[in-house]
Amino acid sequence: DAGVIQSPRHEVTEMGQEVTLRCKPISGHDYLFWYRQTMMRGLELLIYFNNNVPIDDSGMPEDRFSAKMPNASFSTLKIQPSEPRDSAVYFCASSSVPGYGYTFGSGTRLTVV
Amino acid sequence: DQQVKQNSPSLSVQEGRISILNCDYTNSMFDYFLWYKKYPAEGPTFLISISSIKDKNEDGRFTVFLNKSAKHLSLHIVPSQPGDSAVYFCAARGRSATNKLIFGTGTLLAVQP
């Protein structure tokens, strides 16, 4: 298995633009998680899905953030409009038995200028 | 509110010596704890875990200790090797139906040759 695949690896965009981050989980994993890594807050959970259904989005910072999982093999995290404070590394992770360890992707480093 | 805290942002240790990374938590409902290791430009990878019914778990050079009364856990690496240099994240899982992991802010370990 290729593991959790995220794209793009790096994204530089101007303030106000829309940004879409993509994730392909490991086949057979029913849970998908989006995390954001910052120096101040560490790895912060934004939202997670079970069987393509959003279960907990309490970590989504504001309405500018949205996430979808149209099928078991694909998820997106969208920021519209983007702001400089959104600059961070965004990780996607998947799991078949959550809480016993996730498999993380390599992350997307987002820079908003 | 940070439920999982890693108060030392960095730690430097000589090769061959012991590395001790610490983690504190505030929620007594956490029942499972994990350590993840992260190299630059990669996603975090699972290292070792411990259930709340235990106070110690060992895997090779890595040992995790749990002190429930103090709400404190630690990761010991003996002997430390230069390849251990990475960011280490502590994570905790709640006992409720939610399956999400709450991560700390991370500790950067540097093992000097």
Image: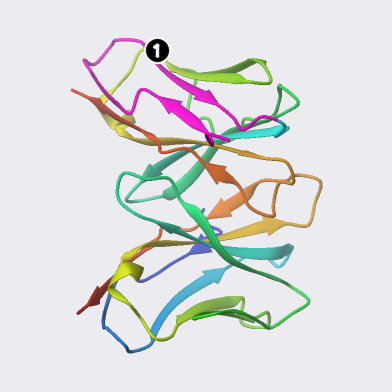
- Residue A2 vertical placement versus A101 (above, below): above
Q: Residue furthest front?
A: A1
A14 part of magenta stretch: yes
Write the residue at 72% across / 32% down. A28
Give the quarter of the figure containing the C terminus of chain B.
bottom left
Q: Position of residue A93 (x, y in %)?
A: 56, 38
- Residue B11 vertical placement versus A80 (above, below): below
Write the residue at 48% across / 24% down. A62
Q: Position of residue A16 (x, y in %)?
A: 28, 11
Write the residue at 57% across / 44% down. A103
Q: Residue furthest right?
A: B97
**Label 1's element?**
loop
Q: Position of residue A8 (x, y in %)?
A: 35, 22
Horizontal arrangement in the rendering, residue A75 relative to residue A6 (left or right): right
Q: For this rendering, which residue is in front, A56 or A103?
A: A103
Q: For this rendering, which residue is in front, A27 or A11?
A: A27
B49 part of magenta stretch: no
Is residue A108 visible in the rendered structure shown here? yes
Report which residue position mark 1 lands on: A80
Is residue B109 visible in the rendered structure shown here? no
Which residues lie in the magenta part? A1-27
